[in-house]
Image (cartoon, coloured by chain):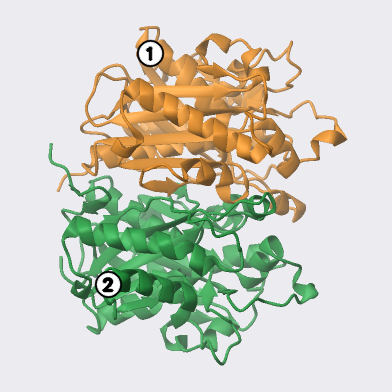
Chain colours: A green, B orange
Amino acid sequence: MTTKKLGRQTAALENPPSIAGNANVVGKKEGDGPLADSFDLIEQDDTFGEKSWEKAESAMQKLALASALDKAKQSVSALDYLFAGDLLNQCIGSGFAVRGQDAPFYGLYGACSTMAEGLSLASMLLDGGFGEWAGAMTSSHFCSAERQYRTPLEYGGQRTPTAQWTVTGSGCVILAREGDGPYVTHVTTGKIVDKGIKDANNMGAAMAPAAYATIQAHLQDTGRRPSYYDLIVTGDLGKLGREIVFDFFHKDGMDLNNLTDCGELIYDLEGQDVHCGGSGCGCSAVVLTGLLLNGMRTGRWKNILFCGTGALLSPTSTQQGESIPSICHAVAISTQK
Amino acid sequence: MTTKKLGRQTAALENPPSIAGNANVVGKKEGDGPLADSFDLIEQDDTFGEKSWEKAESAMQKLALASALDKAKQSVSALDYLFAGDLLNQCIGSGFAVRGQDAPFYGLYGACSTMAEGLSLASMLLDGGFGEWAGAMTSSHFCSAERQYRTPLEYGGQRTPTAQWTVTGSGCVILAREGDGPYVTHVTTGKIVDKGIKDANNMGAAMAPAAYATIQAHLQDTGRRPSYYDLIVTGDLGKLGREIVFDFFHKDGMDLNNLTDCGELIYDLEGQDVHCGGSGCGCSAVVLTGLLLNGMRTGRWKNILFCGTGALLSPTSTQQGESIPSICHAVAISTQK
């Protein structure tokens, strides 16, 4: 039996699955930002016609899934696997979105790394011969996240300079075993890294060491130089976290001038009062399914390393004085097999 | 390219991974029950030496992981993948247990189906050639679950007759690509089923239709009769939920006399005041990693269909008037490849 493992953390896919469809849905603030053109649906009403913010999240996922399937020219009943997760307690954004969908379902919890995690597992299952079609999706909503993690919306709490703004949005990727690409060629599975940061308003700094570790593992496992990639995209470290990752590599003698971050890309950091940028599972999901994959389809980029980062804390763990365990999963996407 | 899919939901593994190690840890109440002999560690102090119930959950997972690795004669750094999840908000039981472990990690949220979900994904990744060793673990704790889902422990709320008792325990399975078994031969991935049950104190009834649907799909996909299995084990429907599944099949003309449930097995339902039985991610995990796998190793059973059931609700979804989306993943385990 052969193994597809390169080094400790990376799998090289033998028959890289093709991204047959990608779609997203965002709220008003995201639609006012610099990536507006890359979103399939910008909804001015952040309730998405629902009676609660939690139900709005499920509504977004359903819209993103339907749109991604439509682009892939497939029905949901063609999916062999659908992976989804979100930030809400017990992942109800996903559970209620997938209820009523005719698809075998695996629920994930990877915080803001969920899109990369779902993409990793879906890609490996297809490459392993366990099916023909698979989906990965996630969402976040500013209002459901604020009230669950921080303070009631009505309270109007002040934000610290290192805080990030939870993206209202959902993204979905549909993968096919055969197709015209872009292709998922490598999966680097992250380990949990925790350097002792305890400030839940500085998650970029908490997650940066995990991103550094996974990117480093990917480069070592594959033998690739950072410059192999047109873009190395973390999501969502924000401005500060991305600068920390840059500094780590700089100390190693590598300048990652192709390093960028979904949390920095999605908003106008100066003009939209979002401090360090965007966050939330939806952030990297909508940047991947918009700007990045569309840019690959139009020939702007050929090779991207998409590095989803997640902070595995909860309000309870913070109240109990714990630091923030973080993780980063990296997925190499290429226009060539 | 060949496909390993049988029918719509089932994957037949070509090189069934071997369960190289299985271990569990439980609390006092579980140790007072009928399965005491099958537990590796029974701790009389439910804090497991920690300062909070949440930290106790992480401590249990760490103990179960270490013990399962020990039985598999492997170190954690041999693991290509470790899957874990739990019931706590943002799955902190798992996140903090895996922090500091040298293993690539995927976080899951499958509620009480988590052990079956982790076992499914770990098995497929090994069969697909993505590594040599993988682990799946989960936990639940009566005290952390009560205060998160129901009422403060000190409140001493009454329990309804259909209620189940959250198991304090953690189970871990270590899978190897090669070995002497028992082997994971088939994986049937569940779809979300929701028949409109809204009573969060009657989760057995809410989850029974999902268990029925997945077992039915498994039998149809594989062409097997229920009697192929020495045991068809759901986890954790409890007494009422298991009876409902029995009735569903009875109406189809099949009497599943080999149907049993981890929630019924783990406690003395009459003597331990647990109403319909056990529940929680830890319930099916400790029954699988104790009674069931040990029974296979000693020749008591040759073929088991392990059917993890999860209720994908949250306190918020219940407060918002929602019904309970449920899921069941089935894993066929055999002493023969």
Among the 4 quarters of the image, the one containing residue A175: bottom left
Q: Is residue B252 visible?
A: no
Residue B232 x, y percent position in the rendering: 46, 21
- Residue B168 is marked as none
- Position above or below: B211 against A75: above
Measure the C-alpha gap from mark 2 to mark 1.
47 Å
Give the residue number, with chain letter if any, for mark 2.
A304
* Labels 2 and 1 in the same subunit: no
Tell me the chain of label 2: A
Give the residue number, with chain letter if any, for mark 1.
B296
Tell me the chain of label 1: B
- Position above or below: A174 against B244: below
Residue B329 x, y percent position in the rendering: 45, 36
> Which residue is at a point 23% across and 57% down the rendered structure image?
A177
Quadrant showing the C terminus of chain B? top left
Among the 4 quarters of the image, the one containing residue B46: top right
Q: Is residue B129 visible?
A: yes
> Which residue is at a point 59% across and 35% down the rendered structure image?
B57
Amino acid bearing label 1: Met
Residue B202 x, y percent position in the rendering: 71, 34
Seen in the image, is A120 located left or right of residue A204? left
> Of circles 2 and 1, which is in front?
2
For the residue labelled by badge 2, is the local secondary structure a helix, a strand or a loop? strand
As rendered, which of B288 and A8 lies closer to the eye? A8
Amino acid bearing label 2: Ile
Callout 1 environment at 10 Å: few (<14), some (14 to 19), or many (20+)? some
Seen in the image, is B98 located left or right of residue A253? right
